[in-house]
Image (spheres, helix red, strand yellow):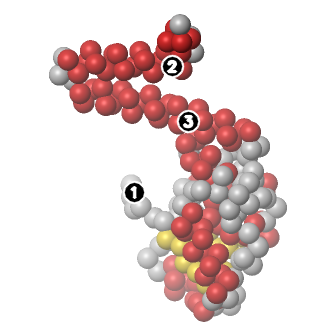
Amino acid sequence: MRILHLFSRPRTLLAYSLIRAGEIILVKGSAYRLSSRIDAVLEVRRHQISNDITQRLEKIVKYGNFKGMKFGNESIWGASDSANMLLGLYEQEICNLLVALADSENRNLLIDCGAADGYFAIGALVSGKFNSVWAFEQSEQQRSSFKKNSEVNNIQSQLEILGSAEVDFLDHLEKEERFQFETSIFLFDIEGEVRD
C-alpha cells in the first residue's frame, strides 16, 4: 500500500518513469543519449526552481555582500543564475574578495571590464563599499539592461557605463583626473571578442 502511495505523487512517478526509460535505453546501448536526456530534464528543472526562487524573493538579493540589490524586469541574467544571485551565492569568492579589498586596502573605485548586466558593478555600489564604478561592456543589449538595473537600484550617479575596453583603455583611464590607480580595483570578466 505504501508503494502505491509513493507512485501517486507526480514527481515520484516522473522519476520512476525516467529511470525505467533509462534502463530500456541502456539495454539498447545508448547510454550517451540517456545522459543527454537526463541533463536536459535536470536543466529544465533547474530553470523552474530558479524562476520560482526569483519570484518568491521579489527579485531582491536577500543575503551576502550585495544584500538589497534589486533586479530590473528587463534583466537578461541567466534564469538558472538568478536564484544563486538572489541568495548571495553567485560567484561568492569574487564578491567576498571585492569587499575585502575595498575594506583592507581603502579602494573605492571599481573598474569592471566585461560588466554584462552589472551584477558586480551594481552590487559593489549597493554594498556601500565603493564610491563609484566604471563599467565596460561591449554588448549594446547588455548595456541597456545594465542601465535599467542601475535605475532600479538608484545608483546611476555613481556609475559610468562605457563601451568596449579596448587594448589602450588603461591609457585613457590615466588621462582622467578622477582616476587614481592606487584606489582602484580591476575586475576582468571578458571571454573574448567577435569582430565583423
The amino acid pointed to by label 3 is His
For label 1, the residue is: 194
Q: Mark on residue 12?
A: 2
Residue 156 placement, left or right of 100: right
Indicate the position of residue 25 as horizontal and vertical percent values. Answer: 26, 18
* Residue depicted at x 54% and y 20%: 11
- Residue in the foreground of this view, choosing between 67 and 111: 67
Q: Earlier in the sequence, mark 2 or mark 3?
A: 2
Name the secondary structure under disc 1: loop
Q: Mark on residue 47?
A: 3
Indicate the position of residue 140 as horizontal and vertical percent values. Answer: 58, 54
Indicate the position of residue 185 as horizontal and vertical percent values. Answer: 58, 81
The amino acid pointed to by label 2 is Thr
- Whether the residues at callouts 2 and 3 have beta carbons within 8 Å, the answer is no
Nearer to us: label 2 or label 1: 2
- Whether the residues at callouts 2 and 1 have beta carbons within 8 Å, the answer is no
